[in-house]
Image (spheres, helix red, strand yellow):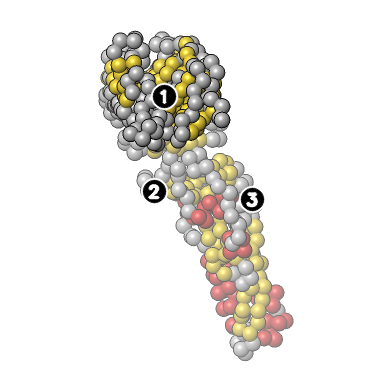
Amino acid sequence: PEEMALPPPRHYCIVKNPVKRDADGNVELDDKMQVTLLYGEEEIRTEGPPFPLYPGEVLKLEPTALSIVPPQSALRLGAIRDFTMPSKEGEGVVKRAAGDEWLFVGPATYIPRVEVTILDTMRATIVKPGTALRIRARQQMKDSGGALRQAGEEWLMRSAGAYLPGCYEIIEETVFPMVLTERRAIHMRAVRTFTDEYGVHRRAGEEWLLTMKECETHIQDVNEEVVNPDLGICALSRTQYCIVRNPWDESGKQQMGRLELRRGEMAFFLKPGEELVGGKTKDVIVLAPDEALLLKATQPFTDVGDVQRTPGDRWTVVGPTEYIPPVEVEVVKRYGAIPLDETEGIYVRNIKTGAVETVIGRTYLLGPDEELWEKPLSENVERLLAFPQNDSKGVKLSEHADFVPTLRDRTKVVTYRTPHNSAIQVYDYRQKTSRVVWGPGLVMLQPDEQFTILSLSGGKPKKQNQIHSLSLSLGPDFMTDVVVVETSDHARLQIQLSYNWNFEVDRSNPEDASKIFQVPDFVGDACKAIASRVRGAVASSTFDDFHKNRCVTSEIASVSCPTLD
C-alpha cells in the first residue's frame, strides 16, 4: 500500500495527469470502470483531507509552503493560457489571455494556479523628498496616475514615498536634484516640446537658464537636457566692465549681432547665446596725467557732452581720468607723453596733411591726427653715426665691413656732435639750400635735411674713396703721399712727401664757408697738384743732380706750389 498525500496547512502540491471529475467533484470512470486521466495536465491541491494518488497520477511537486508576498512588494504574474478568474472586488470575473501580465500586490499569500507563472518579484522603491524616479514604459499602458503611456515613453515620478512600479514599467534610475546657489546657475535645453515643472511652455531646441529666482533645487526632466550644470556668475567690481555679444532684451528676445556694455558694480549670468567679447572681463582704463587714449568711432553715436561722432572719427582722451570705451568705440592705442631734453627731439607727422615737423626740448603728447615719423638715412650715414670712433679724421669703412650698427630709434631727431675745429654741411632737399655747422656744436636734422658725406683719398700712395666722414677738419694737419718721379736720364724714383695744410675761412661769411665743401676730395686734388709740380721739377734734372741736390729741388718744387687756402 502507498501512503496518501497530505498537504499541511498553508502548503500546496502539484499532481501531474490528474483524474477527471464531474461537476459534483466525483471521479469519472470509463466503460471498463477505470479512472479517466487528464494526460499532460497538472492540478494544484492545497490543504485538506488526505487523498490517494490514482493509477497514472504522479506527485510532481511535494507539499510546498505557499508564497507570502510582504508589504511594498508584488509578484509579476504571467498567463500561459487563456482562463478566467474572480476579480479583486469579488464581483464578476476577469478574463486572462495567454501573455497577459499583472501584479499580485502584498501583503498577501499567493495561491498558485496552473495557468499562471511567476515572472518576477518586484519591490517598491523609496522616493526620497527632492528626488524622482525615471520610468520607461515597455508597452502601451496607463500609469498609476491614469495617464496613457506609449511604448518607450519616459516620465518622472516625483511623489515622495514608496513606489511600486507597474508590470509594464521599468525604473531606469533615480534622479537626484541639482542645487542652485547665488553664484551657480544651470543651462538647460529642451529635447522636445513640453511644459516644464514651472508651467512654462518650452519648444524643442529652446535654451534657458535656471537660477535661484526660479527654484533652489531642480530635477532634470526627461524632455530636457543639461548643457552646463555649473554655470558660474560674472561679477564686476567698480573698476571693471565687460562687453556682451548677442544680449537678451527685457522682453526675452535675443538681439543677435549686437553688443552691450555692462559696468560694475553688478553680477549676472550669461544667458544662452551670450558671450563675453575677448572671453573675460576688463579693467577700467586709468590714465595718468601724462597718458592718453587714441580712440576711433566704429558706429555713429552721441558722446559725452552731446558730441556727435561718426564712423572714422578720431579723438583722444587725456588723463588723469578713468575711461570705459563704449561699444561704438575702438581703442586704437594707449600712449604716454614723450619727455625731451634740450638736445633731444622727435619727428611728428600730421596724418591729414602729411606735414612733418620736429619737436625739440619739451614734453610732447601726440594729438589724434599725429603720429611719430621715422626718418630714413642711407646705410653709410647709419654706420658713420653708430661708429664709436667717428671724428673729423673719418673712418675707413672698407676695413670695417663686418661692423653692424646698433638699431636706432628712427622717430627721434638725428643728432651729431661736430668735433672741435671742424665743420659739417647739412643739405635741405626741400628748400634746396645747405648750411654749415661749425664745431664744437650739435647738429639736429630737420625732416628734409641730410648729411653731406665726405669721401676722401687715403693711403700711400693716395687712393680715392678710402676715408668717409661727416665732418671736415679745418687743420692745421699734415698728409703724406708717395710719388713716382723720373729724371731727365730716365731714372725712375719713388719719393715720399709730407705736406702741412689748413683751411683759412671766414666763418661769419656763409658764401665763404660753403666753398670748403665745393671740392669733394681736397686731399686727392691737393696731392695730385703738388705731385705734378714735383714730377716737373725732377724731370728737368739728371739723376746725379737730383741725388746731390734733392732737398733743394724738393723745396723749390714745394715753394712753387700754390698755397691751399
Compare marks 1 and 2 and give the one earlier in the sequence: 1
Q: Nearer the viewer, residue 24 or 433?
A: 24
Residue furthest to the bottom in view is 489
For mark 3, what is the residue?
A: 388
For mark 1, what is the residue?
A: 113
For mark 2, what is the residue?
A: 429
Amino acid type of the residue tagged 3 in the rendering: Pro
Tell me the SS state at disc 3. Answer: loop
Residue 430: horizontal and vertical position, in percent? 36, 46
- The residue at 34%/18% (across/down) is 24
Which-is-in-front pick, marks 3 and 2? 3
Rendered-image quadrant of the C terminus: bottom right
Residue 107: horizontal and vertical position, in percent? 48, 12
Tell me the SS state at disc 2. Answer: loop
Compare marks 3 and 1 and give the one earlier in the sequence: 1
Residue 257: horizontal and vertical position, in percent? 30, 28
Which-is-in-front pick, marks 3 and 1? 1
